Amino acid sequence: MVCRVTSEGRARECIGPAGPVSDWMVARMLEANFAPATFESTPFETDAAIPYSFRKPP
């Protein structure tokens, strides 16, 4: 999944594979807080790749 992370550390415009699990994950990312990217201590907006996988419990 790829999300645009704002300079305030909020995800927006998340894109992932189609389906109910991905829709659930997008919703969680839009609620999450991220550390924004910085350059010389100045935060900026950037795209972030967010890998995820789910496993069936044993």
Image (tube, grey):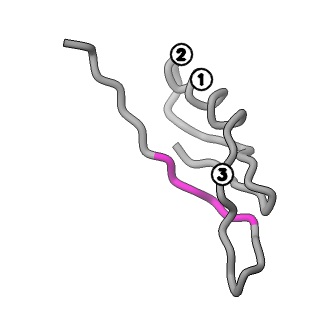
Q: In terms of secondary structure, where does tag 3 sit?
A: loop
Specify the amino acid type for callout 1. Asp
Specify the amino acid type for callout 3. Phe
Q: Nearer the viewer, residue 36 or 46?
A: 36
Residue lying farthest bottom? 40
Question: Tag on residue 20?
Answer: 2
Residue lying farthest right? 8
Magenta highlight: main SS: strand
Q: Nearer the viewer, residue 51 or 41?
A: 41
Labels 3 and 1: the sequence-earlier one:
1
Nearer the camera: disc 3 or disc 2: 3
Q: CA distance from mark 2 to mark 1?
A: 5 Å
User: Mark 3 packing: few (<14 Cα in 10 Å), some, or many (20+)?
Assistant: some
Q: Give the percent coordinates (x, y) of residue 58.
A: 19, 12
Q: Quadrant of residue 47?
A: bottom right
Labels 3 and 2: the sequence-earlier one:
2
Question: Tag on residue 23?
Answer: 1
Specify whether residue 46 is painted magenta.
yes
Residue stretch in magenta: 45-50
Contact between marks 2 and 1 (CB within 8 A): the answer is yes
Q: In terms of secondary structure, where does tag 1 sit?
A: helix
Task: Give the labeled residue for mark 3.
Answer: 34
Residue in view at x 58 percent, y 56 percent: 48
- From the viewer's perspective, tell me whether residue 31 is left or right of residue 24: right
Q: Give the percent coordinates (x, y) of residue 28.
A: 63, 29
Specify the amino acid type for callout 2. Pro
Q: Quadrant of residue 51?
A: top left
Residue in view at x 36 percent, y 32 percent: 53
Q: Quadrant of residue 36?
A: bottom right
